[in-house]
Image (cartoon, rainbow, N blue to C red):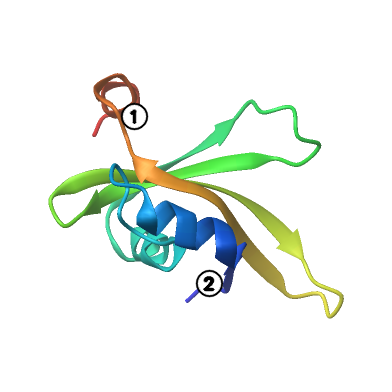
Amino acid sequence: MPQFEWDEPKSVRNKSDPERLMGFNEAAKLWDVDGVEAKLNVNSGEQVYLRAGEINGRVWGAMYVIRTRGDGSRVIRILSFRRLNERERSKYGL
């Protein structure tokens, strides 16, 4: 099981958003289901990825980066988590 981290206040805001209603801890479920992964072209200085799949009958996507800790271990840092729109579902075959 991968290690995850995120900005907790941002996760709480995500869970409070009526269109999202799930915190970033729920995004970790995307690594337990069949889904897709894609590299995104984001000018952030880090390679950003999308992990998408179905949770509770809806298609969700998490944007994330992979970071290396001081001890050499790697962690998935979740940046964003939301339902994918129709265009995105079509683009990624979901």
What crowding class fits label 2: few (fewer than 14 Cα within 10 Å), some (14-19), or many (20 or more)?
few
| Side of 66 where 51 appears, left or right | left
Q: Toward which corner of the image does residue 40 lie, by quadrant?
A: top right
Q: Toward which corner of the image does residue 7 lie, by quadrant?
A: bottom right
Residue depicted at x 28% and y 46%: 18
Percent across and percent down for residue 1 are 47, 76
Residue depicted at x 29% and y 42%: 19
| Side of 68 where 27 appears, left or right | left
Element under disc 2: loop
Percent across and percent down for residue 25 are 43, 68
Name, please, the residue furthest toward the left: 57
Name, please, the residue furthest toward the right: 70
- Up the image or down, 28 lies above or below 13; here it is below
Tag 2 near tag 1, CB within 8 Å:
no
- Up the image or down, 66 lies above or below 58; here it is below
* Residue position for label 1: 92
Name the quarter where the C terminus is drawn. Answer: top left
Name, please, the residue furthest toward the bottom: 71
What's the residue type where badge 2 is placed? Pro
Query: Of the numbered discs in the image, which one, if any, rests on residue 17?
Result: none
Percent across and percent down for residue 60 are 31, 45
Residues at marks 2 and 1, CA–CA distance in whole angstroms: 23 Å
Work out whether residue 1 or residue 80 is closer to the camera in this orientation and state it: 80
**Mark closest to the chain's N terminus, 2 or 1:** 2
* Residue position for label 2: 2
Element under disc 1: loop
What's the residue type where badge 1 is placed? Tyr
Residue depicted at x 30% and y 19%: 87
Work out whether residue 66 or residue 16 is closer to the camera in this orientation and state it: 16
Percent across and percent down for residue 81 are 43, 48
